[in-house]
């Protein structure tokens, strides 16, 4: 049910964005590229959702394997180090501004 909501909403937004791009292009307005990019922004999820909704799982495909736990220590270390660098750089700039 949720995929049909995505299809309907993204389809409506894509159609209206492309229609506005058409009107802007017809009037020679420079916003035609902006509305075209909005149309693509909403049109790509529309097409992908349509393909996903109508695709059927083949009988020849093997059953998916169960997911195994993978330790994420490297990613957590990178996030913590990045957060510390951001906090320290903010504190250093505040301390320099006070002096």
Image (cartoon, grey):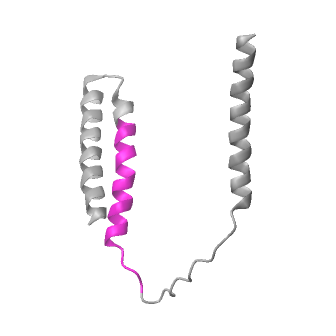
* Rendered image quadrant of residue 5: bottom left
Question: Can you say which quadrant of the picture contains the N terminus?
Answer: bottom left
* Rendered image quadrant of residue 14: top left
Main secondary structure type of the part rendered in magenta: helix
Rendered residue at 72%/39% (across/down): 84
Asked whether 2 or 80 is in front, the reply is 80
- Is residue 42 rendered magenta in the image? yes
Q: Is residue 76 left or right of residue 37?
A: right
In the image, residue 46 lies at what x, y percent?
Answer: 33, 55
In the image, residue 8 lies at what x, y percent?
Answer: 24, 55
Asked whether 3 or 89 is in front, the reply is 89
- Is residue 90 rendered magenta in the image? no
Rendered residue at 49%/86% (across/down): 61
Rendered residue at 68%/48% (across/down): 79
Rendered residue at 70%/47% (across/down): 80
In this rendering, the count of numbered labels is 0
What range of the chain is rendered magenta? 36-58
Height in image: 53 above or below 31? Answer: below
In the image, residue 88 lies at what x, y percent?
Answer: 73, 31
Q: Is residue 7 left or right of residue 84?
A: left
Height in image: 50 above or below 29? Answer: below
In the image, residue 13 lies at what x, y percent?
Answer: 27, 44
Height in image: 2 above or below 58? Answer: above
* Rendered image quadrant of residue 27: top left
């Amino acid at each position: 049910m949720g995929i049909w909501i995505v299809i309907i909403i993204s389809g409506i937004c894509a159609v209206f964005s492309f229609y506005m791009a058409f009107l802007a292009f017809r009037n020679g307005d420079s916003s035609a590229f902006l509305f075209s990019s909005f149309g693509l922004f909403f049109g790509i999820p529309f097409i992908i959702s349509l393909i996903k909704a109508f695709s059927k799982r083949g009988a020849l495909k093997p059953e998916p394997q169960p997911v195994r736990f993978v330790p994420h220590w490297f990613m957590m270390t990178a996030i913590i180090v990045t957060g510390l660098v951001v906090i320290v750089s903010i504190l250093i700039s505040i301390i320099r501004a006070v002096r």
